[in-house]
């Protein structure tokens, strides 16, 4: 998908800087801030709502909030465009 | 903008750290421990790719009940429709247990019963499945690291470098700091996955840039017209409903599955997708699914409950399912175009037509000829995606170990420099089109199923208008940063894949298996027991056809 409007909530106080979410993101939404030792959710409009970052985070520091209406199936009938 | 340039060396370069690339890396180290193996991965090897985003289902053949020839007969008649390489399919089935044992040995968690045997769920008279935990790729990466395989993450292969028709190495770049790498290698193994055009969420790593690099290097492509997989998905969450095609109803409450299917089939068919389109066009939509009272609902959820793993995979599924359940108030469905073009042509040794360049897994599944007239994976053959990647990896490692690595080829620095200039051009432009504009045009051509799945000459021409525009704009893309540069690189590959799809689809004047043309509705064994081979000749897309050697195989029309 392109130009999605999924949101990601991040709770820095819970984060222990393990980098797993950064590794888990398969489409480069998440970058790593080496100074702060925290993830940066830099390219959120490319997020595919896969939930991998949330699933690997054992500290519950990430919440993915999909906006399914921002994904388009692109079929020709208006209802599905 | 200027970035550092670095030269690197290795014996074998693997591009792509999904299950295919990782399995190859482990297997070649087991056979040739002294070999210097380098894996470059665009994202993070072990986490990226697809094997950890799906069902983790592994197809299982009980050797006591199923002979490879029996499954072959079923597959050739019902799925591959005589277009598959039967030698490859036989070998794939015969290696089933060996592959699953290997995964287990490499640390992948596969549930077992109290007697230590794999927990197997029968799914049909000949098929069964077992399930691997979704940390499968992390485990295989760990194994590879233990064996001394080197990894470079966030490093994307941009081009293949050749020397007189032989592979010499590859060009790659860091998506984090822009370093441009020229990597000299005796062999290169492409394990970069298929083309999915960034439409289906979970399939989004399949962006076809490895396929495009092989095409530019002159490698042949086969079965490019079988890159048009689609699945029924719920309209609100877009989550796929596997096997939903058996329960389709139109707005008048008519059971429309019966229009395209008399008995249960192995999996979704393109005729189900066609039926959706025909119903919608005649004003009988929307289409929804209905399941009888007491039915567990869509998908194979009863199986899933029994085999459900407890760890990462369970968290992954639960987050996805519970979030979708919040919006899925009904069972209205429509097609989700997935694609899965996997056309890099390889022989029985997994070598492409460029000497020293190998291609495994999703980037060469259809190109290997094995599945026949069906986009793969899943290729109407659930649980064959991961195992095909492992199969191709093992076969590739065996063939390299048997033939040895040849030295000779040298990287031509002028060729590498030309690749660098082309790659970075979007960062140099002050203005231009965005990668997403180009991708959106490709999606407009590929996603509507009457253009790409239920095809006809006039509808394909319409689609080609979008592709033509996308091609024009792709030469003028502007990238804002390195993340965007990667998107430009991928957008170009999407244009190429779509071009190949329509180019080859226009040539195949019949319908066969998954491949459906409204203007040529019948299977034509007289004229079309042929593979279409697409090739880049001096920048021109050309084709030849190759007769299928059906006479030497056991199952014939
Ligand atoms: C939702 C879903 C469900 C599925 N369910 C199942 C199932 O239950 N059972 C089953 O058997 N199969 C399933 N599959 C299919 C299976 O996951 C794939 O067939 C298999 O994982 C393919 O492995 P691969 O290594 O060939 O490709 P991929 O997993 O696609 O890996 C390719 C890797 O190459 C990287 N890459 C791409 N381009 C470049 C580049 N230019 N440079 C460097 N790296 C690059 C990618 O980032 C990626 O990590 C499913 C797939 C999906 C998406
Ligand atoms: S996975 Fe969780 S704890 Fe680890 S870096 Fe990411 S947010 Fe922090
Ligand atoms: S949900 Fe998936 S795509 Fe989105 S940021 Fe997390 S890992 Fe990346």
Image: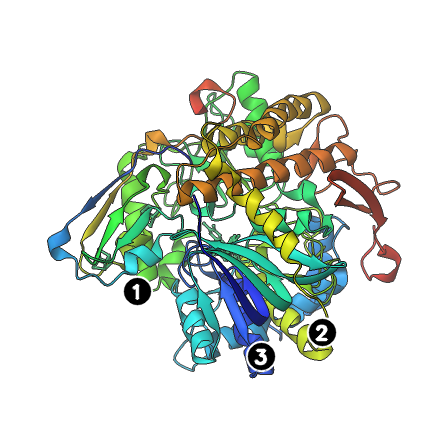
Determine crowd level at label 1: few under 14, some 14-19, many 20+ residues with C-alpha closer than 10 A. Answer: few
Chain under label 2?
Answer: B
Mark with earlier residue (2, 1): 1
Residue annotated with mark 3: B35
Task: Name the residue: 50% across, 39% down.
Answer: B488
B491 and B333: which one is in front?
B491
Q: Quadrant of residue B312?
A: bottom left
Q: Is mark 1 within 8 Å of ligand 1?
A: no
Mark 1: which secondary structure? loop
**Mark drawn on residue B246:** none
Give me the disc on residue B406. 2
- Label 3 and label 2: CA atoms lie apart by 13 Å
Residue A70 picture location, percent across and down: 35, 30
- Tag 2 and tag 1 share a subunit: yes
Instruction: Pick out the residue farthest to the top.
Output: B283
B456 on left or right of B43: right
Q: Evaluate whether residue B39 shows in this view.
A: yes
The residue drawn where x is 62% and y is 75% is B64
Numbered disc 2: secondary structure: loop
Quarter placement of the N terminus of chain B: top left
Compared with residue B321, is residue B326 higher up or lower down, i.e. above or below?
Answer: above
Mark 3 to mark 1 CA distance (whole Å): 37 Å
N-terminal of the pair, mark 3 or mark 1, is: 3
Of circles 2 and 1, the one toward us is 2
Residue at image mark 1: B310
Above-or-below relation of B497 to B363: above
Q: Nearer the viewer, residue A32 or B45?
A: A32
Query: What residue sits 82% from the left and 62% below the top?
Result: B554
Q: Position of residue B72 (x, y in %)?
A: 71, 61
* Horizontal relation, residue B55 to residue B453: left or right: left
């Amino acid at each position: 998908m392109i130009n999605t409007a999924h949101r990601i909530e991040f709770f820095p106080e819970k984060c222990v800087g393990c980098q797993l979410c950064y590794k888990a993101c398969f489409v480069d939404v998440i970058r790593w801030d080496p100074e702060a030792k925290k993830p940066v959710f830099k390219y959120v409009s490319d997020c595919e709502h896969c939930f991998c970052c949330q699933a690997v985070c054992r500290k519950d520091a990430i919440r993915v909030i999909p906006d399914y209406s921002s994904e388009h199936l692109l079929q020709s009938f208006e209802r599905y465009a | 903008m200027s970035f550092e340039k670095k030269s690197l060396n290795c014996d074998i370069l693997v591009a792509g750290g999904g299950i295919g690339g990782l399995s190859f890396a482990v297997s070649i180290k087991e056979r040739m421990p002294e070999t210097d193996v380098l894996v470059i991965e665009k994202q993070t090897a072990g986490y990226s790719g697809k094997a950890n985003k799906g069902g983790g289902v592994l197809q299982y053949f009980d050797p006591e009940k199923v002979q490879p020839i029996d499954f072959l007969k079923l597959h050739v008649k019902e799925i591959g429709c005589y277009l598959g390489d039967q030698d490859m399919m036989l070998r794939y089935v015969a290696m089933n247990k060996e592959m699953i044992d290997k995964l287990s040995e490499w640390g992948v968690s596969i549930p077992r019963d109290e007697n230590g045997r794999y927990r197997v769920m029968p799914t049909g008279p000949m098929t069964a499945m077992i399930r691997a935990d979704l940390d499968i790729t992390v485990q295989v990466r760990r194994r590879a690291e233990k064996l001394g395989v080197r990894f470079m993450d966030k490093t994307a292969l941009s081009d293949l470098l050749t020397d007189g028709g032989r592979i010499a190495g590859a060009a790659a770049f860091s998506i984090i700091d822009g370093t441009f790498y020229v990597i000299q290698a005796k062999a290169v193994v492409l394990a970069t996955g298929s083309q999915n055009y960034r439409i289906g969420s979970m399939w989004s790593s399949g962006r076809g840039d490895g396929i495009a690099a092989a095409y530019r290097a002159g490698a042949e492509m086969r079965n490019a017209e079988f890159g048009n997989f689609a699945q029924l998905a719920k309209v609100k969450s877009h989550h796929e409903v596997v096997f939903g095609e058996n329960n389709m109803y139109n707005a008048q409450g008519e059971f429309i599955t019966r229009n395209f299917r008399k008995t249960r089939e192995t999996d979704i068919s393109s005729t189900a997708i066609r039926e959706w389109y025909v119903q919608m066009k005649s004003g009988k939509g929307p289409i929804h699914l209905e399941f009888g009272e007491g039915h567990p609902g869509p998908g194979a959820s009863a199986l899933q409950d029994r085999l459900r793993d407890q760890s990462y995979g369970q968290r992954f599924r639960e987050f996805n399912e519970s979030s979708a359940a919040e919006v899925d108030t009904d069972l209205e469905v429509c097609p989700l175009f997935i694609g899965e073009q996997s056309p890099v042509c390889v022989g029985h040794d997994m070598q492409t037509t460029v000497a020293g360049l190998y291609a495994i897994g999703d980037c060469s599944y259809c190109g290997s000829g094995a599945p026949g007239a069906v986009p793969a994976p899943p290729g109407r053959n659930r649980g064959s995606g991961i195992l095909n990647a492992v199969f191709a990896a093992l076969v590739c490692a065996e063939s390299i170990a048997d033939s040895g690595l040849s030295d000779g080829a040298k990287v031509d620095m002028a060729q590498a420099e030309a690749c660098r200039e082309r790659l970075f051009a979007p960062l140099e432009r002050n203005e231009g089109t965005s990668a997403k504009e180009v991708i959106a045009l490709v999606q407009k051509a590929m996603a509507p199923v009457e253009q790409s799945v239920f095809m006809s000459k006039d509808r394909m021409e319409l689609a080609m208008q979008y592709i033509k525009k996308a091609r024009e704009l792709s030469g003028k893309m502007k990238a804002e940063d390195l993340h965007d540069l990667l998107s430009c690189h991928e957008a170009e590959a999407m244009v190429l894949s779509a071009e190949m799809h329509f180019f080859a689809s226009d040539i195949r004047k019949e319908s066969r298996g998954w491949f459906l043309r409204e203007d040529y509705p019948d299977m034509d064994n007289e004229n079309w027991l042929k593979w279409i081979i697409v090739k880049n000749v001096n920048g021109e897309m050309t084709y030849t056809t190759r007769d299928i050697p059906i006479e030497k195989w056991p199952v014939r029309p």
